[in-house]
Amino acid sequence: MIRKIGLGISLIFLLGFVIGAKGEFFASEERQWFSVLKTFENFKKIETALLNSDQKVGYVRPYEAKYTWYWSKLDMIMPDGINFVKTVFDDEVVKQGNMIAYDGEYIYKAFILGDTRKIVIIKAYPPRQMEKTTEIILNKNFMPCQIYVNGTCLAVVGLYQKVSSLKENIYFDKLRTLSIDSVLTKTACYIYDISNRKKPTLVRTFYQDGRLFDSRLVRDTLYLASVRWSEGWELLKGEGSWKNDPNFYKPCYYDSAVKGGEKQIDFSEIYYVPNFVFDEYTIVSSLKLGTLKPAKIIAILGGMEDMFVSQKNLYIAIPCRAKVNTSNKAKNDGKELKGQSLISTTVSKFKLTDGGFAPESYATVKGKIVYQGAMDEIGSYFRIVTSSCSSTQKLLKGEVDSNNVYILDNNMKIVGKLENFAPNKKIYSAKSLGKRVYLGTYPNPPQNLFTSEIPKRKGPFIVVDISSPQKPNLLGYLNMPSYATSLYSYNEKYALVTSYEPIEKYKKMGYYNSIKIAMYDLSDVKRPKELFSTLIGSDAGAYWDDNKDQRAFLLDKKRGIVALAVIVYKEAKLPFMCFRGAYVYKIDFKKGFELKSKISHPLEDRDIDFKLPEHVEEKYKKAAKSDGIMGFLVIKDALYTISNSYIKASRLDNMQEIKYIRASGKSF
């Protein structure tokens, strides 16, 4: 229900883009390369830009903003049934936030249940002394989404429900009629001094307009990106003079490190992208942790669709209208439109500085970005993967005509491209492994993958050679025997692939599928060789416990361990859940996958508010009454499994339990 509400709100305001709009802010034709983004001079010019985007045809993001506020629940809206390849990982420089963070000794975990929101700090190492240190109680109007730890700084990023103080007295009644997710939601960041883990101290509060899109921590600087509707739709209605008040259209932000309260971003500081699709502001800011240096913040008119952050640069992808041949001949001849796209993507590049960032250049490429891993840096080059669609009907259905790979140099100039390949195949993920890019696909149209369509929806991995940036080359199609969901690099030669494998007796039904883990030799992309594999849930099926959390899967190549959070079913009158927890395997290239342990988090009686069906055997009841695993951490010689209410430490050598503690309140 929540998913439908979120998408419904989005469709009302986000459906649409303009073909051939008039006005000085919209280029008459698509250019391949630009220098630096331009800014508006005054409200009149931004008003003109908004009013020119009035011919709505239809376009929806591949996935909505990851974080959406519904007062009591955080719903991370993703395409149904897709396990994304992990493309952004925690290393020593670039970190992606999560509900769990650690610093080698302490674990920090966000806890949400109803109106209760808090950060729990657990002393995790050494594991035998593991204990809860303290809790940070958060405002009930704040929804934590991501946690970062850097030295003695703890940054908690999330959503906060607040009407801007600069607007609430005049516009509150009007704002209540708009979407809560638009004007009332702020992206907030609370920074704590945790030099004393038992008594964390709040040292800085920051928030900016819009719902959180994503964030990254690069060294000691935190980058936040949010999206806020520009209220251009309200401007089009022309109801009342308040809609022509320039202050209403200025994005707001607040930084406790700067005196003067809440501030607005002036129109002269708002950048714009020609031919933008979404009448939204993309707001990007940076905070240098451990200091009170004022935040750097900018706004761009044009709603973002994805972001990528490397050690040196930040890239923002914004969908735009593309110039398409719409002559009568073209409309009546499908061949004339082949190779064109109604949507293009403008990528803005920002150079990261000490505690800030600066716009450098931007480029526009054909097509809309793919779901996951669309952008990447390979040496001094930038890579982006897009899908083209020349039909409005296909666009509304989420279908594509073909796909494209572009390689750009340091100045954002296209130096190599591979266009119009893989017709009618939807790319849902892209992964750079060495000198190759692997593209996960499924056929048109995309549907719910947890239905009877699963056995039919096998799509190959497309392999593109990018060893020569000037001449990206299509190597071939890597066909897998089952429905592949994710591909993880093990080394330059081998890759670990997870997939759903239909169970023969349930094949016609399609609902019950095993999880398959396989190690492949990808030396010959046209003939991948399966070295060894294992099945989970071969009796009555198994599913990933959480396909939205990147930490719900662990591949430790150094120790040769793979772990995943699963729900396993057993056959009876009706298949029932007989295990919920983690499967941990040892990777041995001679023996294959060796199951080392099945780790569960049994619930206490006070946590159990459900009853198992009568046909469930007694010996499985305890296993079924377990908390779902949210993530894994490896700290020195111990494996930590983390659920909503518990944390368990196990020895890596034999998987024996070291300690099991209750970390927070009642489980979901």
Image: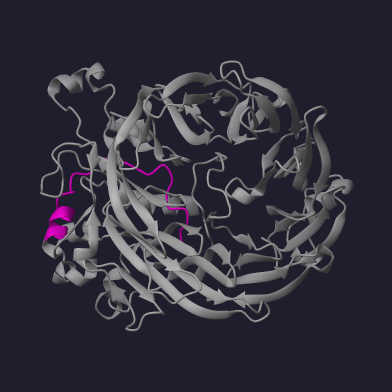
Residue at (75%, 61%) from the top-left corner?
647
Q: Position of residue 512 (x, y in %)?
A: 68, 33
Q: Position of residue 234 (x, y in %)?
A: 22, 60
Nearer to us in this view, 530 or 314: 314
Nearer to us in this view, 456 or 468: 468
* Above or below: residue 375 compared with residue 425: below
Q: Position of residue 623 (x, y in %)?
A: 82, 50
* Above or below: residue 314 compared with residue 343: below
Total labels: the figure holds 0
Q: Residue furthest bottom?
A: 259
The stretch of residues the image draws in magenta is 45-70
- Write down the quadrant of residue 5 in the picture: bottom left
Looking at the figure, which quarter contains the C terminus?
Answer: bottom right
Relative to residue 24, is residue 574 drawn left or right?
right
Nearer to us in this view, 60 or 488: 488
Residue at (12%, 59%) from the top-left corner?
45
- Write down the quadrant of residue 333 in the picture: top left
**Magenta segment: does it hold 53?**
yes
Relative to residue 194, is residue 417 drawn left or right?
left
* Above or below: residue 522 compared with residue 595: above
Residue at (53%, 25%) from the top-left corner?
459
Q: What secondary structure predominates along the stretch shown in magenta?
A: loop
**Magenta segment: does it hold 336?**
no
Nearer to us in this view, 34 or 267: 34
Residue at (65%, 49%) from the top-left corner?
552
